[in-house]
Image (spheres, rainbow, N blue to C red):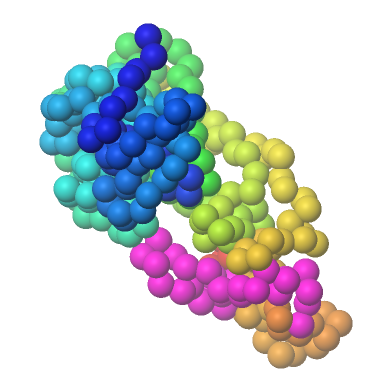
Amino acid sequence: MAETFFAGQDVYAAIKGRGWSPAKVTAATADGKFEVVDNETGEKATNVPASALHGVVPGGYNPQDPDLFRVNDLHPATLLMCLKARFEQAPSQQYSRMGEMILSVNPFQRLAINAEAEREKYIAAPDAMTLPPHVWQISDRAYKRIVASRLGNQSVVISGESGSGKTENTKAMISYLGALSQRHSVNEMQREIVARINERLSESNPILESFGNARTVRNDNSSRFGKYVKLLFDPTSGIMIGAGMETYLLEKSRVCRVGQGERSYHVFYEMLAGLSADDKRRLGGLRNPQDYPSLSRGGTLTRRGVDGRDLNDADEFAILCRA
């Protein structure tokens, strides 16, 4: 049944450029549209259709409750407001639970809840699902279904828009599985196998990110390709015995064309910053990124790390070479 609205009503309004925002209806027009005022900015929006409004349900959600299945009003606007309120109330509430899914809000900063000391609490817990929501719980459940329940192969889908944190969450899940496997190693040979696989997985990240990631207007380290990671476990011992990775759908057009405020692939800037003058001369007289239209057309030559600070491309090139 379609919702009805009236002047003075508190609503969530899908305002262009801001998404769903708390607002108040100030007037209704003859053609069935509405005038609303954004509660946060005070800006007025006119000719808003009813389909872009949703009435606020008092007590519709509790931002301290990590389980979104207990939200009383399962409208997208209410769910988004709940996620927003949870994160603004405490950045440690980066994750929320929704059935078998974990929803993550990218904090664009390093948080203590993602530290190794916190990870150990989830690994050591008899049931990791009793702890606050975290992407590690997805890894834990998949691992136990393979090793403890013998349910066979498990798949995890990590999806989201650009800048939502897919790359970082993928790395967090893989590192958790590596640590869990290390914990189940009972002899030196098993520990060496797990350590070698973990090392190679870690070393592959700088290579993949340098050659496949770029700065966009929404994300300074945006993966411009799809990635399928396969981890192999011995279901009897529970240790990781192998790993593989497939990449696909690389955005090839970015090599020669980037939008305003964007960069091409990291590796070009890293290489030009990290090579010595002799190496540049030996490779045909390479110059600086600003000297190449394909690299400088976007008007930005830097990128920021997770903490928001500019990264040093020369340092990143050294990391790439070691990998």
Residue 289 or residue 73, whichever sits in front:
73
Residue 264 or residue 170, whichever sits in front:
264
Magenta span contains residue 313 = yes
Examine the rendering and report whether any part of residue 229 can be seen: yes
Q: How many marks?
A: 0
Q: Relative to 225, does residue 234 appear above or below in the rendering? A: above
Which quarter of the figure is the C terminus placed in? bottom right
Name the residue at 62% across, 64% down.
Answer: 262
Name the residue at 47% across, 38% down.
Answer: 47
Furthest residue toward bottom: 277
Could you say where residue 294 lies in the image, as x and y percent from the top left?
77, 69
Q: Which residues are magenta?
A: 291-317
Magenta span contains residue 258 = no
Figure quadrant of residue 147: top left
Name the residue at 46% across, 74% down.
Answer: 310
156 sits left or right of 6 in the view: right
Which quarter of the figure is the N terminus placed in? top left
Furthest residue toward right: 284
Q: Main secondary structure of the magenta part?
A: loop
Q: Relative to 131, does residue 172 appear above or below in the rendering? A: below
Could you say where residue 278 lies in the image, as x and y percent from the top left?
74, 90
Residue 37 or residue 136, whichever sits in front:
37
Examine the rendering and report whether any part of residue 167 can be seen: no
Name the residue at 22% across, 42% down.
Answer: 85
Figure quadrant of residue 141: top left
285 sits left or right of 222 in the view: right
Could you say where residue 79 lies in the image, as x and y percent from the top left?
30, 30
Figure quadrant of residue 261: bottom right
Could you say where residue 303 lies in the image, as x and y percent from the top left?
53, 69
